[in-house]
Amino acid sequence: MRNFVSQRAKNIKPSGIRKFFDIVAESKDVISLGVGEPDFITPWDIREAGIQAIKKGYTQYTSNKGMPALREEISGYLSYNFNVHFSADDTIITVGASEAIDLALRAVVDEGDEVLIPDPSYVSYKPCVELAGGVPVSVPCDGANGFKLTPEALESVITNKTKAVVFPYPNNPTGGVMEKEFIEKIIPIIVKHDLLVISDEIYAELTYGKPHCSIASFKEMDGRVVLISGFSKAFAMTGWRIGFVCAPKDILAAMLKIHQYTTICAPIFSQYAALAGLKQGREDGYSAVREMCAEYDKRRRFMFETFTKMGLDCFEPKGSFYIFPSVKSTGMDGEKFATELLSSKKVAVVPGQAFGEFGKYYVRCSYAYSMKNLIEATERIAEFVKSIKK
């Protein structure tokens, strides 16, 4: 019998995160700092809206784009919070931000098109580009400058085949952000080479110090930004699988066709829940989101101080809920460090290689866990580091 698996699917590498945590799942008494999921429960007003939607029998399809009321609320939310202006008609409700990433890339990438991806970055960008027939191109980002995308690094990898650049800030796994003054430096390059920007802003609400600045808020970017976000992180709604994408009309129309054939629509009760979250947030200043962000900030500062005391070179994260310490001083790369830490101290972190070749000497730790777990985990890590630095 022939091998029926497509060559493209064969060539896709398994997720570096999931591959590692298959091992974790088989281990006992492990403290995990690996999963990027809030430890908070979805706020009650949001849960109640989902429950009421089911009780009222709202179990049908919505329109392909999603509920008009939710799309209108998203439009207002983006305008009020980030000075970003997309109409409800420019918006599709998706099954999480993950579907939005896939839709955007499949809608714009032709065979052989190059898509630039800051490295390190979230694990799904590269395989989604490949599945769309494109060529992912890494753009090195250095911890010494906060893992920012620099004009020099961006310009150095652009060719006549470059079509788009993924803009993943605040960044997973590094916690890096791009402030306004740094975005302004790369915009002329994007315009000069006529590139599309796919801006993944799922962590926009989780910044520490300065508020998030969206690249879509710049006038020069009109017509060349696809904005992706959702409710999983800031609203603690990972399991509800609800996200959204906003885009110029021609790109949105292409995404909608793919969405129609592959997904139809996001779950209706999740849409009602998200709508309640935005409405309540508009009324109370997004107090639930602010409270969660303040707690993450405490954990962030604890993790940074703790890793610094261990003697690990560590960038202080400015966004998301991850920290990305370098383990190079231990004589190990991230893969070896994570494997031996798990084996000897029962603490799970993610090897930096999972996020790109420039993450080789790093590990990712999530601080979306209780302080009790973070304290215990970092004590074990400190013991491990001390033992191998003797």
Image (cartoon, rainbow, N blue to C red):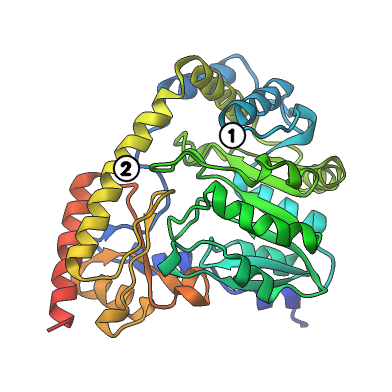
Q: Residues within 10 Å of mark 2 (few under 14, many from 20)?
A: many
Towards the viewer: 257 or 159:
159
Q: Residues within 10 Å of mark 1 (few under 14, many from 20)?
A: some
Q: Amino acid at mark 2?
A: Asp
Up the image or down, 310 lies above or below 248; here it is below
Residue 175, position as x, y percentages in the image: 43, 55
Q: Quadrant of the C terminus?
A: bottom left
Residue 205, position as x, y percentages in the image: 48, 38
Q: Which residue is mark 1?
A: 82
- For mark 1, give the secondary structure: helix
Towards the viewer: 298 or 109:
298
Q: Does residue 361 show up? A: yes
Up the image or down, 272 lies above or below 28; here it is above
Q: Quadrant of residue 380?
A: bottom left
Q: Are marks 1 and 2 in contact (CB under 8 Å)?
A: no
Residue 134, position as x, y percentages in the image: 76, 70
Instruction: Kindly identify the residue that appears in the image at 20 percent across and 71 percent down.
Output: 311
